[in-house]
Amino acid sequence: MSGLIFCSFKRAAKPYYLESAKQNIYSIEELCYFLQDNIYLLDENIMTPQFCDWLEMEVEAVELSKKLRQLMEDQKSFRVFCMQIIMDSGYFSKNEMQFLGMKLQKMDHQSNYENRKIKADQLMEKKRYLAAIEEYRNLLLHATDSPSDVRVSGDIWHNMGTAYAYMFCFERAVSCYERAYELSHRVDSLKAASQAVCFLEDSERVEWFLQQHHISKEQFAAMKKNLGELQRMTEASQDYGKVLQLIRLAQVSPVQAKSEIHLQIDAWKDEYIAYKG
């Protein structure tokens, strides 16, 4: 998709909340833009009379609303429902519609468990960490003892650990990585746990971890040194550079710095809200 897109339908005064994606939409075009890269974040929960009411009343897509109501009455699949939106939106090219159609067809042939796993992974990619964790936990409730499910469960625990680490919840991150290592014996899970444990301030917990995984004090010291090098690299990052810039500005112009600091805090708040998903 490229170039300027003219909206074919009215922009809604009241948004529709996509429960499965944890996101508001204000137009069909916005929904289509979302569908293009996040189709796994939607599910059958969108197939409701309330969604059709929103289309009819808020964006004045009366004909599309009628078609979708008929599809629900005929008990058509989620794939058919989504394709109707894709075809009637006027947003996609022929090639894009075919591509999305193939994605939806693939979803039809995958299990609900597989689709939800992909959904959780996409939430992780979008930095919607709490929403991803919620999905991962729901997946674990339905896992079996089969070798394939045990391997997938190990991957899920590892990803949950990463989500917690990104939110600075290092104790939970360590526990998740350890569980992942128990299930799948992935070396990177133990390595990630070892990195996360470096951030814990609980000396007894750290000592227990080192004993459990046969990590010597010398190896632990080397890990902490490597993290120190990583921290120095982080200090050269854009975010850290922005903080240094604000500190210097405060020394020269406190009033201007105050305004800039508030803007930066607002940006961090938005990022945190996105994490919560």
Image: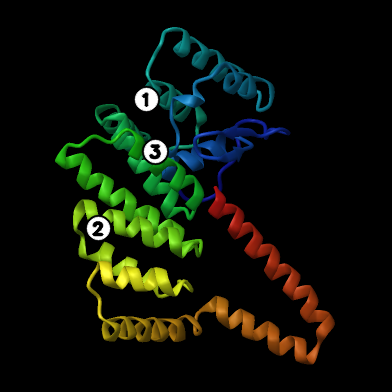
> Vertically, is 177 above or below 195?
above
Residue positioned 24% across, 45% down in the render:
152
Residue positioned 63% across, 80% down in the render:
243
**Between marks 3 and 2, how big is the CA–CA gap?**
28 Å
Mark 2: amino acid:
Tyr
Q: Nearer the viewer, residue 27 or 3?
A: 27
Q: Earlier in the sequence, mark 2 or mark 1?
A: 1
- For residue 36, side relative to residue 113 (left or right): right
Which is more foreground, mark 2 or mark 1? 2
Classify residue 26 by image quadrant. Answer: top right
What secondary structure is found at the residue carrying circle 1?
helix
Is label 1 in contact with label 3 (beta carbons under 8 Å)?
A: no
- For residue 186, side relative to residue 53 (left or right): left
Indicate which disc residue 180 carries: none
Which is more foreground, mark 3 or mark 2? 2
Which is more foreground, mark 1 or mark 3? 3
Indicate which disc residue 79 carries: 1
- According to the picture, the residue beneath numbered tag 2 turns out to be 181
What secondary structure is found at the residue carrying circle 3?
helix
On the image, the x and y values in percent for residue 86 come to: 45, 30
**Between marks 1 and 3, how big is the CA–CA gap?**
11 Å
Residue positioned 59% across, 59% down in the render:
271
- According to the picture, the residue beneath numbered tag 3 turns out to be 40
On the image, the x and y values in percent for residue 225 come to: 36, 86
